[in-house]
Image (cartoon, rainbow, N blue to C red):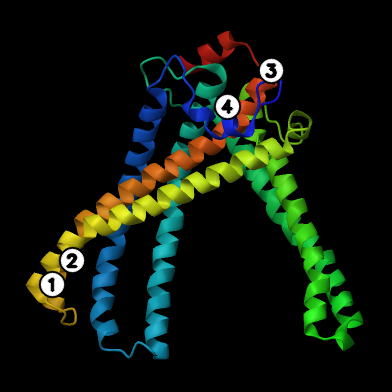
Amino acid sequence: MSKNGFSADKAAFFVFDKREDKAALRRLGMVYVAGRLILFVIVMSITAPFLVGTLPELLDLDPDSTQFAMEIQSFANVFQTIGLVAGVIFLPLFISIYTALLRWMIHGQSGSKRIGLRFGEQELHVLVVFIAVTVLLVFGMIFSIIPLAIIMVVAATLLKAAGSAMVALATIPFGIIWLGVVIWFAVRLSPATALTVKRGKIQIFETFAVSKGHFWGLFLAYVLQFFVIIAASIAIVFIALLVSLPFLGIGLAMFGWSEPDMANVNAYIALAAVPVLIISITGFILEYLRYAMGAGVGACLVVAEGVPAVSIKDEASKIT
């Protein structure tokens, strides 16, 4: 652990540190899961009639045919479009929850007994930072890959006579360097939202000064969180199998191994509803924890660094 109190293990689990309002994490999580669940039910309610209407035609088609692939793609496009719209609708709530989490971790403010949600100036700042950092990383990757591609083409041309294996070995280092640079920028920019909440104004490139000397601590914190989430995901898959087995057994007892019968489509949906709902809620909880833990890394850094902030009195007045 560094002398200023920042370390990878502390940052990775900073969201779980003891605080005065211990229930804030749980309250915000309940709002997140409820919001995701409501949108999920709406999306499924909209797409279900389309799926039911498409099933008879799909069952009559050869799974290897072009028509079958086109029907599946058509349904996927409809589902993706509705999902995108649902994501845009959910965005304000997500930003409000994410900002409330940062405010709670950095300033110790969670709105007292209230949930502490709002959508004001600070939330708009966080949204702008989210968009700006995403755009910077995406366009940075796009434009930086152009010189990489040129270098790889030149290397391939020069080493063509040596064989494809030598070409691959020669170009791999360039790819590793490019990936390393992208990761470096992403990690150094990652505390931007936390710094924005800490200082009360939009902070993007200022993040480089705060994260200076902390790349490896931040990077290892995210790596540690990645493995924690992977382990939790495996556990969820196991739970999903346990939950689904009884319903699968009921389905086999009722319908056997025969092909789906459209006359029993409502029974199929009813049997699948409970395990799908349980699995979805578990997934939403894991999703919330992933975002909360990620936010905690940046919050831990700005708190440990003692970054100057707007006054607590001003922040409290904004909440009330």
The image's mark for residue 177 is none
Rendering coords of residue 287 (x, y %): 43, 45
Q: Residue at x 74, y 28 (%)?
A: 210
- Whole-angstrom CA distance, mark 2 to mark 3, is 55 Å
The front one of 315 and 7 is: 7
Q: Is residue 163 visible from the viewing direction of this image? A: yes
Q: Quadrant of the C terminus?
A: top left
Name which of mark 3 and mark 4 comes first in the sequence.
4
- Whole-angstrom CA distance, mark 2 to mark 1, is 6 Å
Front position among marks 1 and 3: 1
Q: Is residue 22 left or right of residue 148?
A: left
Q: Is residue 265 left or right of residue 33?
A: left
Question: Label 1 amino acid?
Answer: Leu
The image's mark for residue 248 is 2
Name which of mark 2 and mark 4 comes first in the sequence.
4
- Mark 3, residue position: 306
The front one of 232 and 61 is: 232
Name which of mark 4 and mark 1 comes first in the sequence.
4
- Whole-angstrom CA distance, mark 3 to mark 4, is 20 Å
Give SS at disc 2.
Answer: helix
Q: Residue at x 70, y 16 (%)?
A: 308
- Mark 4, residue position: 122
- Whole-angstrom CA distance, mark 4 to mark 1, is 54 Å
- Mark 1, residue position: 252
The front one of 89 and 178 is: 178
* Tag 2–tag 1 contact (CB < 8 Å): yes
Q: Residue furthest left?
A: 254
